[in-house]
Image (spheres, helix red, strand yellow):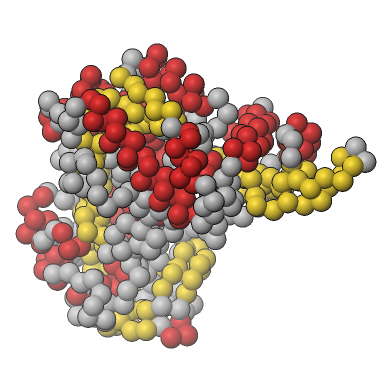
Amino acid sequence: MEKTEPIQNHVPEEKILVLDFGGQYNQLIARRVREQNVYAEIRPYNRITVREIAQAGYRGIIFTGGPNSVYDEKSPHYDPTVLDLGIPVLGICYGCQLMAWMAGGQVKSAESGSEYGKTMLHVEDNPLFAGVPHTSSCWMSHTDYIAQPPAGFHISARTEKCPCAGMADEGRKLYGVQFHPEVTHTAYGVQMLKNFLFTVCGCTGNWNMEDFVQKKVAQYRKELAGKKVLCALSGGVDSAVAAVLMHRAIGDNLTCVFVDHGLLRKNEGDWVESIFRGQFGMNLIRANVQDRFLTKLAGVTEPERKRKIIGEEFIRVFEEEARKLGKVEVLVQGTIYPDVIESGAGDASTIKSHHNVGGLPEVMEFERIVEPLRDLFKDEVRKVGLELGIPEKLVYRQPFPGPGLAVRIIGDITREKLAVLREADAIFREELDQSPIKAQASQYFAVLTDTRSVGVMGDMRTYGYCVALRCVTTDDFMTVDWTHIPFEVLEKASSRITGEVPGVNRVVYDITSKPPATVEWE
């Protein structure tokens, strides 16, 4: 099976190389660049040579962060001649230390000088910090520091504990920062990135999602010409956008398989079928395999096992449907970047396996998996959806995990629990949809916990389920804040759930952000 490569949708006139050294926020850097309408291309440090960089026409290079120490010979390193290409370079965190190391500077363990979290930053005037106050807040995460900048560099920023929080060789257009300008916690991080892109690199900002759609359609129309393609359609935003994009590219050669595994929200199966078969006119197969999935999941309580089981059964169902169609070479999935990073892509640690990434079985019958949205964040996927003409009601629909309600039921999964959760979830979403807070909320749903507690209803003792409500606000789903829902909205939702859903006698609200939690409970 050929695994899909990261997006290479076209070669724009101006593009930035994000050279990946294994940090958790590498894709976030690319996203921040793309937000400025400059195309960003991510390449692992060990999969592109200096010669290839020189020939590719990059306007600038960004060295990403990473979890290693540059003085450890096993850590990711790179050819120092990259600094002599005449292409502007911005090193971030580990990337800054690596730049210093490559150019002959000294990097040491910070010992007592480690910094994590919000830190006050003091900067000097230079092109990277134009429009940035001399003192502002930044986000630090490091245990090493630059003890001596290389020859030709001067210190351009500092913090109380870090004497070299930034360095610059302005003549060669080489800049390094120890902090993370790509995260929202760095107050003027976006301004710094703008300065690098437009002032230092000379970009104009002429790339947009219309380009992305046009080039992706052209790419797959050429690559998949004459091939039969199967699309894994869950009905969620990501798979919906992937399906419409591929349908535009290859038309009737695409068949969408909607696996109704019995783990969907209330009335969802019928809604998905009506939208894609009726509104979009796609070839759609609805596989009703509820009993099959519930049998496989019977007695399973460990979250990763649930995801692995669901991932494998998804693929097996697709393979069975593909056999009915004859030889189908390609499987399309709506994988997006948060799925990839949480499933431990590259050097990032595994947080949880997604059914369409880490949950895939080792042996599959498809020759290739195509994931056209793999390098995009949720808000970017929605922009692509609107560009494709998908109705806003679907594009801005509540995100829903591929494993469905299986990861919103703590403990084993039964028909009884699914029925309880569907009703509780529908009530909560209905109340939020009618509240002004909906404009702030990015995702909201109910979770059926594995806790039962004593209650009283009608002077009678009850021993019922505890339902947890979850609502978060975010712009990228990499970090989220819990949403401050008005008490009256929570009160009405709780009253309706305990009054209308048999078996539930307690409702709680989850006020945990990500990190330390994830959006889903499992």
Tell me the quarter of the picture where residue 348 sits: bottom left
- Give how far across and how far down residue 402 sits, in percent: 44, 40
Q: Is residue 158 above or below residue 133?
A: below
- What residue is drawn where x is 45% and y is 54%? 305
Q: How many labels does the image show?
A: 0
Q: Confirm whether residue 213 shows in the render.
A: no
- Give how far across and how far down residue 92 sits, in percent: 33, 64
Q: In this view, does 66 lie above or below 230?
A: below
Tell me the quarter of the picture where residue 100 sits: bottom left
Taking 453 as reference, is 222 left or right?
left
- Give how far across and how far down residue 191 sits, in percent: 39, 52
- Closest to the observer: 429 or 324? 324
- What residue is drawn where x is 22% and y is 80%? 73
Q: Confirm whether residue 317 shows in the render.
A: yes
- Closest to the observer: 413 or 22? 413
Taking 435 as reference, is 97 left or right?
left
- Closest to the observer: 238 or 52? 238
- What residue is drawn where x is 32% and y is 26%? 256
- What residue is drawn where x is 21% and y is 47%? 3
Taking 116 as reference, is 365 left or right?
left
Tell me the quarter of the picture where residue 377 sits: top left
Which residue lies most toward the right here?
459
- Give how far across and how far down residue 81 sits, in percent: 11, 68
